[in-house]
Amino acid sequence: MIPPSPARGPPHSQPEPAPAGLLALAATFLRLGLTAFGGPAAHIALMEQEFVRRRGWLTAAEFLDLVGAASIIPGPSSTEVAIYIGYRRGGLRGLALAGSCFILPAALLVSGIAWAYVAFGRLPTAVGILRGVEPVVVAVIAQALWTFGRTALKSRLLVRYRINSTWLIAGGALLGIALSAR
């Protein structure tokens, strides 16, 4: 995790979070946990919208740095981002609250969907429903990647040619693999 900013001081010196602040934190992550479909890329785009643009809890630069740091840590980056935002807003209680409110609803929802799929997945109606949901999920992910990708493009060269730096990193990794295989 990213350490707290110098202005906030070490975790033990943080003021006690206000109950209203913890309530807002819990409600926000509960809503995201229940409604954010499409995996970490979609989650991160929704978090950027919520915490940078709507609430102003982080600047765009802080959020991009947080996503970059979370991307190099093993595990789902959106969960790591959620947990850090919770920590930053409410200390250790905020960390636990944001993490559980973000993770548990999705886990319970997926468990319910998995049970329904096992029980009813071979029925023609269920197959039709699943086929109808697929393009919606793809559209949600594409929209999230488009929104967040435009925010993440920093240099003029990358913006001018609309190249996402992730593709440059992936291309460099593939080139390295190809050259080392010789």
Image (tube, rainbow, N blue to C red):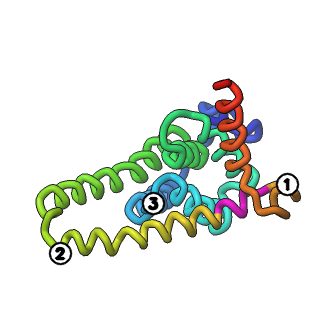
Amino acid type of the residue that numbered disc 1 sits on in the rendered structure? Ser
Amino acid type of the residue that numbered disc 3 sits on in the rendered structure? Gly
Residues rendered magenta in the picture: 148-153
> Residue 13 sits in which quadrant?
top right
Report which residue position mark 1 lands on: 155
Residue under the point 42% across and 72% down = 136
Work out whether residue 69 or residue 50 is closer to the camera in this orientation and state it.
69
Alpha carbon of mark 2 to alpha carbon of mark 3: how far? 23 Å
Q: Which secondary structure type mostly characterizes the magenta part of the structure?
A: helix
Alpha carbon of mark 2 to alpha carbon of mark 1: how far? 49 Å
Task: Name the disc covering residue 86, or none.
Answer: none
Report which residue position mark 3 lands on: 38
Percent from the top left, x then y, of residue 58? 68, 55
> Residue 31 sits in which quadrant?
bottom left
Q: Quadrant of the N terminus?
A: top right
Percent from the top left, x then y, of residue 36? 45, 62
Work out whether residue 161 or residue 175 is closer to the camera in this orientation and state it.
175
